[in-house]
Amino acid sequence: MERTTKKVLGYEVDLITFKDSISLIIESIKSKRSMHIITINPEIIAMAQNEPAYSEIIKNADLIVPDGSGIKLALKLKGIKQEQIPGIELAKSVIAECCEQNLSIAMVGAKEDVINKACKNLKSEYANLNIVYSHNGYFDDNNKQEIINNLKNSNANFVLAAMGAPKQEFFIKECMQEMKNTVFIGVGGSFDIWAGEVERAPLIFRKFGCEWLYRTINQPQRFRRIYKTLPSFLFKVIIEAYKEKN
């Protein structure tokens, strides 16, 4: 599948449907092609702009899907109608496909009790799901290599890292240096939702691209981070879109 992208503030975003993104990921898994999937949003772009090493990881990713509604809006301002692809839904759909096609997964991230509950709930939902390795996300440089070695030895086809950005992307980069035939995705707080520890936004919020608002209402500590990121992002993408049209 030929890759079609459009830049948002210097970062390529794949113009792809939800269905095609799943097909592309499964094709890469079955062909044993390595892939790093980024579910990009305004916060990730803001972090990348302030951290060159992180920026490099984003720019070298193999698939960058528009997770945040802000990315969808930025593309719309450029005259591009692109559906939003929530990372949690994309990852869950790939997990379902892995179950159907006898492909294995591994999960790294969250607290110990959370990842255990997430694995248990996923196995209840998908009876034939093959989770070959799981580990919490609370580790340091002293035991990180051991985790990478265990991941490598597990021969997992699809690895989900849920440690939040940018930590999960740096971890994935290190893993990919030793695991050349594996597909990786960073999924932020998805394990907490799959474990039933955090409630996902109601459908009405998701339908109108306001899941971020629901999370902010329920987690007020997020407000300061959102407040710093969104206004600046919107201003920059409006200027960028104007310059491209003129």
Image (cartoon, rainbow, N blue to C red):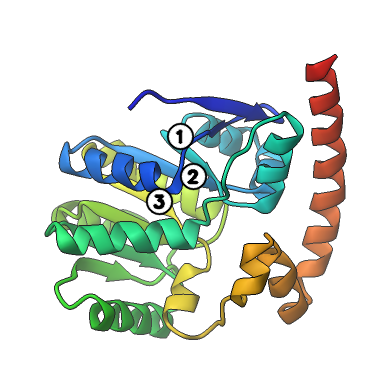
Closer to us: 52 or 115:
115
**Could you say which quadrant of the image residue 153 lies in?**
bottom left
Left or right: residue 213 versus residue 158 is: right
Residue at the extreme top of the image, as rendered:
246
Three-letter amino acid code of the residue under disc 3: Ile
Task: Determine if residue 143 is in view.
Answer: no
Q: Which residue is mark 2?
A: 38
Q: CA separation, marks 2 and 3?
A: 6 Å
Task: Determine if residue 50 is in view.
Answer: yes
Q: Which residue is mark 3?
A: 185
Label 3 packing within 10 angstroms: few (<14), some (14-19), many (20+): many
Tell me the quarter of the image containing the N terminus.
top left
Q: Which residue is mark 1?
A: 61
User: Do the numbered discs 1 and 2 sit on residues whose CB atoms are within 8 Å?
Assistant: yes
Closer to us: 210 or 171:
210
The residue depicted at 30 percent of the width and 43 percent of the height is: 23
Label 2 packing within 10 angstroms: few (<14), some (14-19), many (20+): many
- Taking 87 as reference, is 2 above or below it? above
Three-letter amino acid code of the residue under disc 2: Ile
User: Do the numbered discs 2 and 3 sit on residues whose CB atoms are within 8 Å?
Assistant: no
First-in-chain label (1 vs 2): 2
Label 1 packing within 10 angstroms: few (<14), some (14-19), many (20+): some
Three-letter amino acid code of the residue under disc 1: Ala
Q: CA separation, marks 1 and 2?
A: 7 Å
- x, y (%) of residue 119? 30, 77
Left or right: residue 24 versus residue 82 is: left
- Taking 207 as reference, is 65 above or below it? above
Q: Secondary structure at mark 2?
A: strand
Left or right: residue 83 versus residue 104 is: right
- x, y (%) of residue 72? 66, 44
The residue depicted at 87 percent of the width and 49 percent of the height is: 231
